[in-house]
Amino acid sequence: MAGLFILARTMGAETGQPAWGYLRAFAEAAMVGGLADWFAVTALFRHPLGLPIPHTAIIPENKDRIADSLAGFLQSNFLTPQVVARRMAGLDVATAAGGFLTAPRGAQSRVTAGATSLIADILESLDRDKLGGMAKQALRHQLDRIDLAPLLGQMLTAMIADGRHLPLIEALLSRTAQTLEANEDLLRTMIHDRANGLIRLVKLDERLANAVLDGLYKLLAEAVVHPDHPLRLKIVDGLEQLAHDLTHDPVMAARVERMKAEILSNPAFTTWLDALWERARSGLLAAVRGGGSGGAASAQFAIALADLGTALQTDPRLRLLVNRFSRRTLVGIASRYGGQIVRLVSETIRRWDARTVTARIEGAVGRDLQFIRINGTLVGGLVGLGLHALDMAL
């Protein structure tokens, strides 16, 4: 525009044509408009020509205030509970999550691979002894807190009520008969040793042993065959009495607690816990690390996630619960932590140096800054042209 102004001024003086006057007025005003917009745009980001003119370099000089204003704007317009609740009311989070988990290209496989890998990394990175000590201590603490006697009494009562004690009684009777048969010679010797001399003299000790053993075999065989045998009924009565005592008798409860305490304090129990923890840890690691793309645990986890995705898409009640939970969770986050979130934005901008703020904002606006200068030039030129025409008309 400066070159055009010089050309129009020179040619107008030489030729005297009024058209050069219009061109000169346009170029002169356009030059002023372009310089004014250059100054205005430059003053936003830096001092024009490096001169410390007041009210220039507006963004660098006021970046802290801009950061606070931006944070306040975000909190007021995006992170209020009302805005989040209104936005979440139109979102079906459950269906979206279900579609992701049932995606045909294996979206859930990425989730399962990441989850199983994370579990394995945690197990391998944490100290084995410390982690095992925590797990064993927690298990021991839970066992110590269990009131064992009533629990055993309730289990025994339920077992008797369902008839699950009958196979146990039959197995006990059969095992007793097998033990008796295996130790028959020992029993005969005991009867022979305890018989007096007269019985041994007349050889009645052998008949006595046969009679005792035959009677025991017959008793056990009849008890196994007949459900209403007095021996079986006696065992059932004993089990019912034991269940009652375990549930209601303080003396029995104290005895069971003493036995539990003795077991927990036994070194053999500690050794058993050590072995149990190591097997569990090794098994879990093998499950999540072994077998191709994550092992059996990963495959089962993937199936479970796919089933969950299907349920989220087809079960209206589950979908309602998940959407309600997600809405309440995000509203709660906005209510409790909205201030901290926007404070993070504000503090981040505050930590930027002035050059960084200027470069990022100027880069975000981009070519529009050049068009502002061009538009200012053209608008100034048109205004100058109009004013010149009005002056000529008057």
Image (spheres, helix red, strand yellow):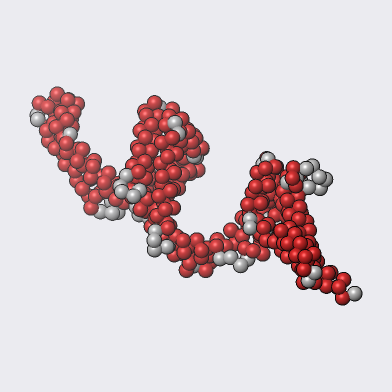
Instruction: Where is residue 165? Give x, y as percent.
Output: 34, 50
Left or right of 256, for residue 12 = right
- Which residue is at the far bottom? 393
Answer yes or no: is residue 358 visible.
yes
Left or right of 168, for residue 36 = right
State the quadrant of the N terminus: bottom right
Answer yes or no: is residue 257 visible.
no
Instruction: Where is residue 216? Give x, y as percent.
Output: 21, 41
Residue for point 76% across, 62% down: 10
Nearest the eye: 52 or 272: 52
Instruction: Where is residue 379? Give x, y as percent.
Output: 75, 66
Residue for point 83% across, 72% down: 389
- Which residue is at the far left? 202
Left or right of 83, for residue 21 = right
Instruction: Where is residue 394? Give x, y as percent.
Output: 90, 74
- Asked if residue 163 is positioned above or below residue 287 in the image, the reply reads below
Nearest the eye: 15 or 27: 15
Residue for point 67% across, 53% down: 334
- Asked if residue 37 is positioned above or below residue 203 in the image, the reply reads below
Residue for point 47% across, 68% down: 314
- Which residue is at the far top? 197
Nearest the eye: 50 or 338: 50
Res. 20 image quadrant: bottom right
